[in-house]
Image: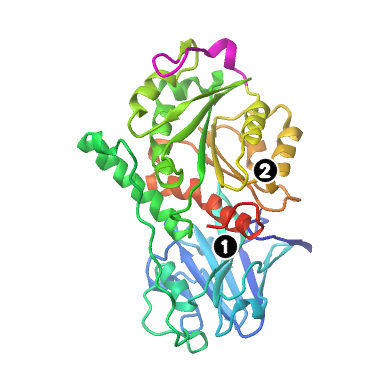
Amino acid sequence: MASLTLARGQNLTLPTADLVTVTVAGTGLDILAFQLTESNTVRDDSDFVFFNQPRSPEDAVRLVGPTDIEIALHAVPHGIERIAVAVASERPLGAAAPTATVRAGDAEITAPADGLSTERAAVLVEIYRRNGAWKVRSESAGWDAGFAALVRALGVTVDDEPEAAHESATPEPATVTPAIRRVEGEEKLSLEKRQKLDLRKKAVHKVLLTKGVAGRDARVILVIDKTHSMSALYRERTVHRVVERMIPVATQLDSDGNLETYLYARSFAKLPDVTVGNVDQWVDTFVHLRGRHGSPMCPDIDYDKHIGGANEEVPIMQAILDDLPDEQPVLVLFFTDGGFHSKVPRIRTLISEAASRPVFWQFIGLGDNNFGTLTTLDTMTGRVVDNAGFFQVDDIDRRSDEQLYADLLGEFAEWVSAAEHLGIVRRR
């Protein structure tokens, strides 16, 4: 049996197997499991599995002992994107030292809890779908307020708590939910555009709130592939719509609400920021494959000579690394239809070396191409923290805002927590 250990924030693809078992070791723990939708909440209370309700409705998730959860992957219903396995305790989890062991096929994957101290409830691991495969990620995401705070955060209605997970008589300090951010220029939008922006901002905020990073400041960088193979995506204005849908991410994360942007091919060009107020002009000015563009927003750029038309990812990635802040989280949204064929070892090295720096690479594959190399960039071993993610979007116009932003921001939010714990990014 292959034995592997996951650090906090790391993920691995599970071997093909129908039955997955999660065993939790530690003292004085209640084991819990949640079937979660794309919004990271249960559909209803029946998706919560614990000692008073030991099976999910479809019998996909079962509590089979005081320390064991079984997951029959074939029975996990459509619409459930992940199964979170958690623990709750009367005592701080730092003293309980919980460890989750995941068994699937011939693999045994250990995920020791990391960074937990005063918390009395925590999600230890998640089993989740990604690009048609099942993966496991080490979470160690805790709640000081215990069982009730955990289950409420995941959408369960709480009336009575399990006897082993009572909250202390000392009231928890009140917490302030970060508000949805407004940025300059919104007031000048038409009613239709303002309503669309508001809905997308709410979708972004919901993901950040669920993942515990709402109100956090991060620098957001958009990188767009400008190679000749992207011609259909430019011609059909798919790239235009990508830019529009990334603006709400910047409004809720970036301190100035602006979206830093680059076009890349063999070389790259740094473009003026996209803002709520200039997006239409920006798209018309810059989203092209060939020619000279820039006026009136900046001096003209010769797209053919300056940027080129073939893939070469190393220069743009290196330029971003050369311009990183000291401790501010940086989210790079990297849209491409493929490439990543040349200098693959160098790309892997760049990402591995950058794991100790405050940057998360979120790669998004556009179209139905083969993204073989890209799919491996978020599963590389030997990094201090998992600092890259990948997902594929065959048709971005059919991806709901809720799902798109969950895919874009889920792993980034988990990286922020892990990187903060390791001192890679500053604490909030």
- Tell me which corner region of the image, top left, top right, bottom left or bottom right, holds residue 401: top left
The residue range painted magenta reads 294-310
Residue 250, given in percent of the width and then of the height, sits at 43, 41
Q: Residue furthest front?
A: 326
Give the colour scheme of this rendering.
Answer: rainbow
Q: Which residue is mark 1?
A: 126
Residue that label 2 marks: 376
Residue at (43% x, 33% y) in the render: 242
Q: Quadrant of the N terminus?
A: bottom right
Tag 1: amino acid: Glu
Crowding at label 2, few (<14), some or many (≥20) Cα neighbours within 10 Å? some
Q: Is residue 297 magenta?
A: yes
Identify whether 277 is placed above or below 203. Answer: above
Q: Residue furthest left?
A: 191
At which x and y percent is residue 106? Answer: 74, 62
Residue at 66 percent across and 84 percent down: it is 27
Q: Is residue 38 visible?
A: no
- Image point (41%, 40%), residue name: 257
Q: Is residue 66 visible?
A: yes
